[in-house]
Image (cartoon, helix red, strand yellow):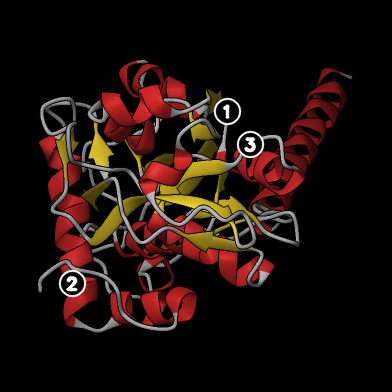
Amino acid sequence: MRRNRLAIIMLLLAALLITACGVQKFTDVNAGVGSDPTPTAQQSTPTSESKGGDEDGKSIDVGTNVPGVLTVGFDQNFPPMGFVGDDGEFTGFDLELAAEVAKRLNLKLELQPIAWESKDMELSSKNIDCVWNGFTINGREDKYTWTKPYMANKQVFVVKADSGIETLSDLSGKAVAVQLDSSAEAALAERSELVKSFGDYIKAPDYNTALMDLASGAVDAVAMDLIVAQYQIEKRGDYFVVLEESIASENYGVGFLLGNEKLRDAIENTLMDMVKDGTMKKISEKWFGEDITTLGK
């Protein structure tokens, strides 16, 4: 009787062992079903040239706030440098440069619209890695860490074509708008006598608002970037014109939190590579019809 019980117990143990082995084998065979397989070294290597990736194509530390992510702060109402396109997506010359740089550095690009007057807070709180959006270096040299200038610009006045305003003296008694905390506002701060001659001096939240006010007749002129003005005039036909006299000349650069030279160097070196291989020229021609960049020239 005892022998029969022992035989039964042995048979049960053997069955359990066979079942366990079968389950383990089934699990191994189906591991990873429904998810992407682990990439091989060849699959993880990017197809584009990269100056910031390691041998496996992974991003390396270049000083971004979030490893592997480049977060670019920009004014989404600043065409053609950065704005919302007709398809609802962010686009623009600067954003296209940033996308190419991020690609070459094996970084994921995050585009972060910001209120222009809050750019310092966004940088200091590390919500963004840089400001890249027609950002003027002049007068701000010691407030940020900068790349070398990549584009020249001027601050000008835009008026209606039929306004009869042709010179700066014609702005006397007129209502003039400028974007809050913009380079145009900074330039006008150096022209106090000119500002005193205005009938009204209005600070708009963005250039789109200022230009809508100009079109409606709420203001008589808008002080703004020449590059942006030319783009707007091209889109609107001959409805607006730019006065020949400019307020100031300046240069655009990419601005970083003061002291972040590591990320600045990585981006600047990549931009130089784009100059050498013709990519920057190609992007400029796409947006402006010619190469108006100045980096490396």
Residue at mark 1? 205
Secondary structure of residue under mark 3: loop
Secondary structure of residue under mark 2: helix
Of discs 1 and 3, which sits in the foreground? 3
Place of residue 183 in the rendered image (x, y in percent of width and height, measured from the top left)? 33, 37
Residue at mark 2? 273
Q: Earlier in the sequence, mark 2 or mark 3?
A: 3
Q: Residue at x 13, y 40 (%)?
A: 262
Of discs 2 and 3, which sits in the foreground? 3
Q: CA distance from mark 1 to mark 2?
A: 36 Å
Which amino acid type is marked by label 3? Val
Q: Residue at x 72, y 56 (%)?
A: 33
Secondary structure of residue under mark 1: loop
Q: Earlier in the sequence, mark 1 or mark 3?
A: 1
Q: Nearer the viewer, residue 258 or 191?
A: 191
Q: Nearer the viewer, residue 92 or 264?
A: 92
In the visual, does 95 lie left or right of 174? left
**Relative height, residue 66 to residue 117 (above, below):** below
Q: Quadrant of the N terminus?
A: top right
| Mark 1–mark 2 CB contact (< 8 Å) | no
Residue at mark 3? 219
Place of residue 287 in the rendered image (x, y in percent of width and height, measured from the top left)? 47, 74
The crowding category of the residue bearing disc 2, from other C-alpha atoms within 10 Å (few below 14, some 14 to 19, many at least 20), is: some
**Relative height, residue 8 to residue 250 (above, below):** above
Q: Earlier in the sequence, mark 1 or mark 2?
A: 1
Q: CA distance from mark 1 to mark 3?
A: 14 Å
Q: Tag on residue 194?
A: none
